[in-house]
Amino acid sequence: TSFDAYSHGSHVAGIVGAVGNNATGATGVCWGVKILPLRIIKAVSGGTFGTYSAAIGAMDYIRTLNSSSRKVAVANHSWGGSGYSLAMLNTINNPLSTADPLPAGITSTYLSDVNTMTVNGGGTEVAKIKVGMTISGTGIPNGTLVTIVSGSNITLSDYTKTTGSNAALTFSNPVRPKPYGVVHVAAAGNSRFNLDRIPIYPACLPSGFIISVGATDSTDAEAVWSGGSGT
């Protein structure tokens, strides 16, 4: 369209909602859909330019629209960046402060993977660890959140390099994600990366409100250029 300086948004909108049976162009998957275009990327000499702040602004606008009633059900993110953003995660998760008690006397083992660890402590204290709490400790970047809790195994929001065995852990700022009626569908990228090791965002943000989507070819196999998980 004349409002789409790069044309990618129009292309994706057509995949989503282009009306068929009219001998014109392509056919989308949902002919009756209503689409709200929010532009965060512009064409520049030799390519495109966009910022996380523009993306966060668009997400905040959606959240505002849904504050009184559900006007937006799905947000499509056919874009991505290589840097983790706590601000973007908070915009998607819409965190709500809670009065959950904070665990004490918790220590860590070495990371079992790039963003997971096993914690040590009394059972009552370990049970206090909740998704959304901020976690601090040796080797853990500032602002890192707990995103998954499975017994004594926890997953972190940022990709840490190492933690010391038996290093003390502290927890603060207990919050929980607050749904606001939107599922964020995010592209897994076009670089054939293992996203468990080389993440792309927002697809790899640790949020239960995100569905990360790769690409398939004409045989319904994973496209050779699609990002994904595993080795």
Image (cartoon, rainbow, N blue to C red):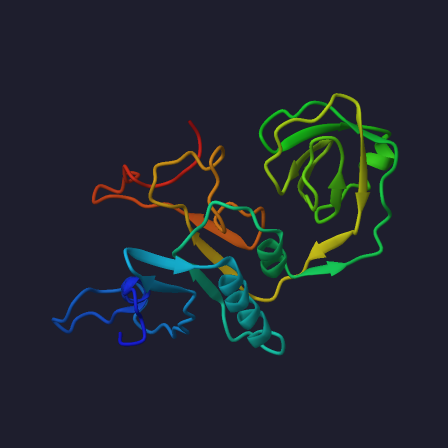
Q: Quadrant of the C terminus?
A: top left
Q: Nearer the viewer, residue 19 or 76?
A: 76
Query: Does 66 appear above or below 96?
Result: below
Q: Is residue 163 left or right of residue 15?
A: right
User: With 59 as the anchor, is 30 left or right in this view?
Assistant: left
Q: Residue furthest bottom?
A: 68
Q: Quadrant of the N terminus?
A: bottom left
Please name the residue shown 24% across and 43% down the image: 217
What residue occupies the far front of the structure in this picture? 45
Q: Quadrant of residue 90?
A: bottom right
The picture places residue 7, in percent across and down from the top left corner, at 27, 65
Most distant residue in the left direction: 23
Identify whether 209 is placed above or below 130.
below
Does residue 154 lie above or below 208 as drawn?
above
Where is residue 33 drawn, in percent x and y? 36, 72
Q: How many marks?
A: 0
Q: Tell me the residue at 83%/51% (across/down).
A: 100
Q: Nearer the viewer, residue 92 or 82?
A: 82
- Using residue 95 as the reference point, say whether residue 28 is left or right of it: left
Horizontal and vertical percent for residue 150?
A: 68, 35
At horizontal 14% and vertical 71% (from top left) the residue drawn is 24
Residue depicted at 52% across the width and 46% down the height: 83
